[in-house]
Image: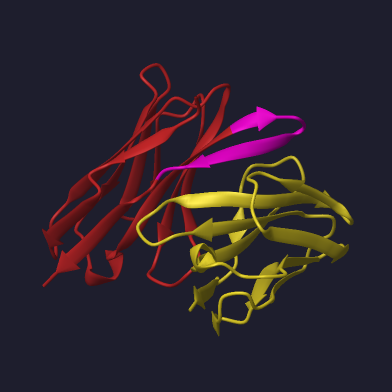
Chain colours: A red, B yellow
Amino acid sequence: KNQVEQSPQSLIILEGKNCTLQCNYTVSPFSNLRWYKQDTGRGPVSLTIMTFSENTKSNGRYTATLDADTKQSSLHITASQLSDSASYICVVSRHSGGYQKVTFGTGTKLQVIP
Amino acid sequence: SQTIHQWPATLVQPVGSPLSLECTVEGTSNPNLYWYRQAAGRGLQLLFYSVGIGQISSEVPQNLSASRPQDRQFILSSKKLLLSDSGFYLCAWSVAGVGEQYFGPGTRLTVT
């Protein structure tokens, strides 16, 4: 069964601290993995996209890693800011019938406090 | 540049009433279009996707339906809303055959 599991479900950190969010998946055949940031009441916005051959990709203070062998990904946030408070969703795509089927994780809710 | 619009932004409807949510995309042609629902504390659930005008695929059985009357217009409808239809509805688009999906601002639906 194609699944994406994220941990932790929620996280509270102090402003300026770093944190790492985890994503484990069983989606197959793997096409790509993306991390989205979703502010409350808004649509998700893409942070990074990684294909099978990519191990690390950065976008500002966000760094995503991918281990395709163990089917794990992480999103590391450096020097957190209050504006980082949001849900972070891991999304894994697979090829199916001519288009890419995506499986969404349930997200990690991050709260950055002053 | 491409933009995606959804309306209304929020909606409160009584049980048994009809529903029509609209999504339009600008700046691209022949996009794949998607409707998702996000229940409180839950992940995104794909409801429908469309690869072209009049071509709709349903992912889960439900009392909702979707239509694509024009290339860049995607409509989510219901004849009679249920309490369980409450949630956050997101429309998304992607370039045909490419995985990156771009989401609209969403519609918050509350069925009372």
From which residue to which does the magenta span run?
A: A94-105
Q: Nearer the viewer, residue B41 or A60?
A: B41
Left or right: B2 in relation to B12 = right
Relative placement, left or right, of B71 versus A76 is right
Q: What is the quadrant of the N terminus of chain B in the image?
A: bottom right
Residue B82 falls in which quadrant of the image? bottom right
Residue nearest the observer in this picture, A14 or B45: B45
Residue at image coords 56%, 81%: B14
Q: Outermost residue, front direction?
A: B16
Instruction: Give the residue at the far top of this rendering.
Output: A69
Q: Is residue A56 above or below residue B64?
A: above
Relative depth, front residue between B14 and B102: B14
The x and y percentages for residue B66 are 75, 60
Residue A110 image-quadrant placement: bottom left
Residue depicted at x 47% and y 29%:
A54
Q: Is residue A104 above or below residue B44?
A: above
Q: Main secondary structure of the magenta part?
A: strand
- Residue B104 visible at all: yes
Image height of B56 relative to B81, above or below: above
Note whether residue B1 is visible.
no
> Percent x, y for residue B74?
76, 65
B17 or A101, nearer to the observer: B17
User: Is residue A85 shown left or right of residue A11?
Assistant: right
Residue B89: % across, % down = 56, 65
Picture coordinates of residue B97, whole percent (x, y): 74, 40
Q: Is residue A98 magenta?
A: yes
Q: Is residue A7 magenta?
A: no
